[in-house]
Image (cartoon, rainbow, N blue to C red):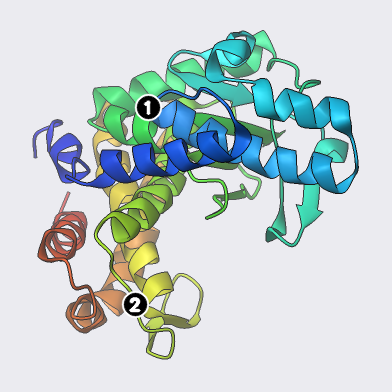
Amino acid sequence: MSALFPEALVTLDGIAGHQHLRTSRIASVLGNRLGSSALDYAVAHHLLEGAEHAASAWDADRLAWYRNTTVRDLTHLSVDPHIVLSPRPADMLRSEISETAYYLVGPDTASATPEAQAIVHAALASATEHGFGTLLTQHAPVICLLNRRRLDETLHSWALTRLPGTVFTDYTVHPEVLARDLIHEAAHNWLNDALAAHDVNLPADVTFFSPWRGTRRSVFGFLHACWAFALTVLYARQARRDATGAVVPLLDAHLRQQESQFVSAVDSLAEALSYVSADVLRDRISHAVSKAVESA
């Protein structure tokens, strides 16, 4: 499989237009001058949520910051073309936005450490080398690094529908691991944008067994798992060929685990995809899973 294959897989008409329209609407609400890039799209949602928080707290100065700030004001946080955040655990927020913790860029946000920036840079380079640069540029332009972990520790990562384009993730010093997890969460952001761009509405009362969660999940959740884990397999399979050292057995274990999970999920995929009204989106998910279950 060519390293260019994933780039073509995630290039989908309609997504850029959806992002631009959403950004324009947020800019209109804020009275701001935001651009049309994927980074503007991600940052716009941080500014909107931050403005709502500031308004609720009657914090006029903070509200003004969120209404006036643009991407050009955040270059000190940049690992081009991404913004990298590294908040302290005490800075993480919880609210009605999400059951999980999250973080919003703000006037007091500091840049990530040089070490963290270097790890991100290396992870982005690895992802790009293996065909996932566009996915991360367009759907993970804001990277929020959480806890540094050892390879033998559990890593947590997530994305929020209210903050599209932002990825929250633990990390290790191994760029291949961070690249894999960024790809996984960016895949979720991609699918959310793709469903919205193509006006796909999935039923909430139809469920399928998800081996990744060990329980039945809605069509939405099941397809998200199939798509995101398929992309991590495509990346890990290629990255494994060049990897050395301690990360090799971890990538091998990931591939073995995903092979087992897809065996349990693939028989339900066609039925789940029948609820996706957009042919082009249905074909992308099916093709990604087909490639993922091929022998390495």
Question: Mark 1 and 2 residues: CB-CB less than 8 Å, in contact?
Answer: no
Residue 129, above or below 17: above
Give SS at disc 1. loop
The percent position of residue 45, horizontal first and vertical second, equals 57, 40
Q: Nearer the viewer, mark 1 or mark 2?
A: 1
Chain-order first, disc 1 or disc 2 = 1
Q: Nearer the viewer, residue 234 or 103?
A: 103
Residue designated by label 1 = 36
Give SS at disc 2. loop
Identify the image quadrant of residue 122.
Answer: top left
Identify the image quadrant of residue 222.
Answer: bottom left
Identify the image quadrant of residue 128.
Answer: top left
Q: Nearer the viewer, residue 262 or 116?
A: 116
Residue 41, above or below 206: above
Q: Is residue 143 left or right of residue 133?
A: right
Residue designated by label 2 = 202
The percent position of residue 9, horizontal first and vertical second, equals 17, 45
Q: Residue at coordinates 43% horizontally, 23% vertically from top-left?
A: 35
Q: Is residue 233 left or right of residue 104?
A: left
Q: Nearer the viewer, residue 195 or 215?
A: 195
